[in-house]
Amino acid sequence: MSKRLTNILTPIIAVLLGILVGTIIMLASGYDPAAAYIALWNGAFGDIYYIGEVIRQFTPYILAGLAVAFAFRVGLFNIGVEGQFIVGWTAAVWVGVAFELPRIIHLPLAILAAMIAGALWAYIPGLLKARFRVHEVIVTIMMNYIALHVTNYIIRNVLASKSGDKTDLVKETASLRSELLQSMTDYSRLHWGIILAIICCFIMWFLLEKTTRGFELRAVGFNQHAAQYAGMNVNRNIILSMLISGAFAGLAGAMEGLGTFGYAAVKGGFTGVGFEGIAIALLGANTALGVFFSAILFGILKVGSLNMPLEAGVPNELVNIIIALIVFFVASSYIIRVFLERFSKKGVK
Amino acid sequence: MKKRKIGMALSMVLTAGTLLGACGKADDNGGEKGGEKKDNFSVAMVTDVGGVDDKSFNQSAWEGLQNFGKENGLEKGKGGYDYIQSKSDADYATNLNTLVRQDFDLVYGIGFLMQAAVEEIAQQQKDAHFAIVDAEVQQPNVASILFKEQEAAFLAGVAAALTTKTNHIGFIGGMEIPVIERFESGFLAGVKAAKPEVQVDVQYAGAFDKAEVGQSIASKMYSSGADVIFHAAGATGNGLFKEASDRKAKAPDKDFWAIGVDRDQADMGPEIVLTSALKRVDVAVQDLATKAKDGNFPGGEIVLYGLQEDGVGLAPINDKVANKADIESAVKDWIEKIKSGDVKVPGTREELKSFSVK
C-alpha cells in the first residue's frame, strides 16, 4: 500500500472508529444512535441556516488548524494558538472600533493588526526557543493565560463601552459580515472570512511545498542538526515559523472579532478554538488540504451536536466523547498504520 | 454487516428527507402563526456555558420552566418545554435560532452573556418572543428580567456578620459585571449594617465555570481566618462548598460556613451551608412564561424582581448555627425595612461608599 494512501486512510479510519465506539457508548448508555446521528445531520445540514453556521464555525477552525500544522511541520508544537487567537481577536476589534476609515483600508488594516498581534504573541516563545532552547510547549501554554487575562483587562478598562464587559460593534467598514451571505443563509452568521481561510490554505501549501524558504522550514522540521549542517539558519527558521503560525492564529481571531461576533467580550475562559486546532491539525496530518477537510468535519460535529439534545435526547457531551475518540485514534494512528501495512501485505500474498 | 450499513444509510437519507420536508411545511405555515393561537404554549431556554446542572443560575431557570410545564400539563420536548446547553459563546446565536426554528412560543436566554445574541436575533426574527435574564435588551419582542440581587445579598451579609466568630468574612465573585457588583455591594452593605467591625475579603475568580479556581480562593480565605464565605460565582462557587466540606470533615469542631447563591444550595453540604442568597430565577421564569401564555407578554419592558415581588430572598438558616433565632429575627427586621423603603440597599460600589444605616 502506498504511503500516500495510508496517509489518507489513517484519518478516515480514525473517524470511523470514533463514530463506531461512539455508537457503542450510546447503545450502552441507552440512547438511540441512529436518532442521534440523524439529529447531528439535521443540526448541521437540516436547513440552509445550519449550513451557514457550519461554515461560520469551521472558518476559524481552518486557520487555527493551519497555525498548529505550520509550526508542527517545522518541528514545533505550538500550543499557544489559543492565546494568539485571543490576542488577534482583540487587536482586530480594537482597530475596528477605534478608527474611521474607508472600507478598503479599514478592513485590511484590522485583519493585518490581528495577524501582527498573533505573530508577536508567537514571536516570544519562538525567540526563547531559538535563543535559549526554552521548550515552546511550556512557554506557549503560559502565554495563553497571559493573553486571556491581559485581553480581558484591556477590554474591560480600555475598549469596553458603558456596559463594562464588551466592546462596541466594530465599524461597518471593518466588518467581515455580509448582508448578502446572511440573507442567503437565512440569518446565519456566515461572513466573508471563509474566503480568507481558503486563501490561507493555499498560501500554506505554496509556502511549504513550492518555495526555497519552505524547503528550509521543512528541513528544520525533519532534522535540525542535518539542516544546520547543510548551512541553514535553524534559529531564524524557528522564529519565522512561529511568526507565521501566530499570524494564522491571529487571523483566526479576526474571523471571530470581525465576523462571527463583531465585538470582543471579557472571557471567563478559553474559547477552545486554539485547542481544537491541535486536533484538527493532527487529523489533517499537518497538510493544508488535510486541515481544510478536518476543520469541516469538526465544524459539522460542533454545530450538529447542538441539535442532539433537543431532537434525540442525547446529551451533547457525547459528541465531545466522539471527538475525543477520533483524536485518540488519530494520535494512536501508529496502530492503524501497522494494521494497514499488515493488511496490505496479506493482500500481496 | 455491509448490507445493514447500506440499509441504515438509506433510512438515514429517507428520514432526513422527511424531516426536511417537514421543515418546508412549517415554513409555509409561518404566515398564519402570528394570528391564531396554538392550544399548546411552548417555551424553551438556552443556558450559558455553565450548563443546565450548574447547581445555580441555569439550573434554577430550568426548574422554573419545569414547574411551568407541570402546571400547564406540558411535556418535555418540542411543543412543550425544553432547554439547550451552550458550550461556548459562539453557540448562543445558533441555539437561540434553533429554538425559534422549532416554533417555541417563548425563548429564554439565560444570562447576561447572551445579550448581544438575543438582541441580534430579536431583530431578525420579529415574530418570535424572547426573554433575557440578567441583561437589558431594548427590542419590542424581548422582555428583560432583572433582579435586585443587592437585597438578597444584603440579607446574606447580615446573616454572615451575625454568624462569624473571627469577624472575618469572604466574598467570591464570578466575573466583574454589574450583576455581581450588585451582589458584592449588597453583601458588604449588609455586613456593615449588622456588624461594622467585620472585615470582608473580596476576590473575583474571573469565571463562572471554574470550580477549581473557586476552591483555591476559598482555601486561601479560610486559611487567612475567614469563617464565613459568600459566593456569587455560579458553578465556580461549587469549589467553595468542596473546600468547606473538606475542612469541616478534618476539623469538625471548627466553623467553615459557606453561603450559597441563586437557589437554596443547602444540598451542597448540610454541615457547611449557612444559608443562600436566593435569586428566584425560577419564580421569574415561571411568572413571565405564565404572563406570556395569558397574552400579557411584557415585550420591550424591563421586569424587575426584588424582595417585594418575591423575586429575591434568603433561604432558611442552617439549624446548626448557635444563634439561629437572633439571625432570623434580625433578617426579618431588615426585610421589613427594605420592603417599606426605609433602607435602600446599594447596587453599585459607588452607592456603597455613601451607604450608612442609622
Image (tube, coloured by chain):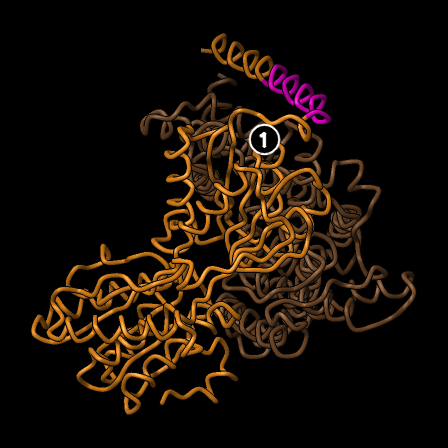
Chain colours: A brown, B orange
Residue A8 on image: x %, y %:
60, 33
When asked about the image quadrant of residue A217, the answer is bottom right
Visible residue check, residue A216? no
Identify the residue at the far front of this view.
B340
Is residue B29 in the magenta section? yes
Task: State yes or no: residue B69 in magenta.
Answer: no
Q: Nearer the viewer, residue B349 or A12?
A: B349
Q: Quadrant of residue A159?
A: bottom right
- Residue A220: x, y in percent? 63, 61
Question: Quadrant of residue A20 in the image?
Answer: top left
Span colored in magenta: B16-32
Disc 1, SS:
loop
Q: Is residue A311 left or right of residue A89?
A: left
State how many labels appear: 1
Amino acid under label 1? Gln
Disc 1 residue crowd, few under 14, some 14–19, many 20+, Cα 10 Å = some
Task: Estimate the x, y position of residue A145 in percent, counting from the top left.
Answer: 51, 70
Q: Is residue A11 visible?
A: yes
Vertical side of B67 occupied by A244: above or below: below
| Residue B74 horizontal/vertical position (percent) | 42, 29
- Of A66 and B220, the residue lying toward us: B220
Quadrant containing the N terminus of chain A is: top right
Residue highlighted by disc 1: B102
The chain containing the residue under callout 1 comes to B
- As drawn, B155 above or below B38: below
Pick the front one: A246 or B81 = B81
Relative to residue B257, is residue A186 drawn left or right?
right
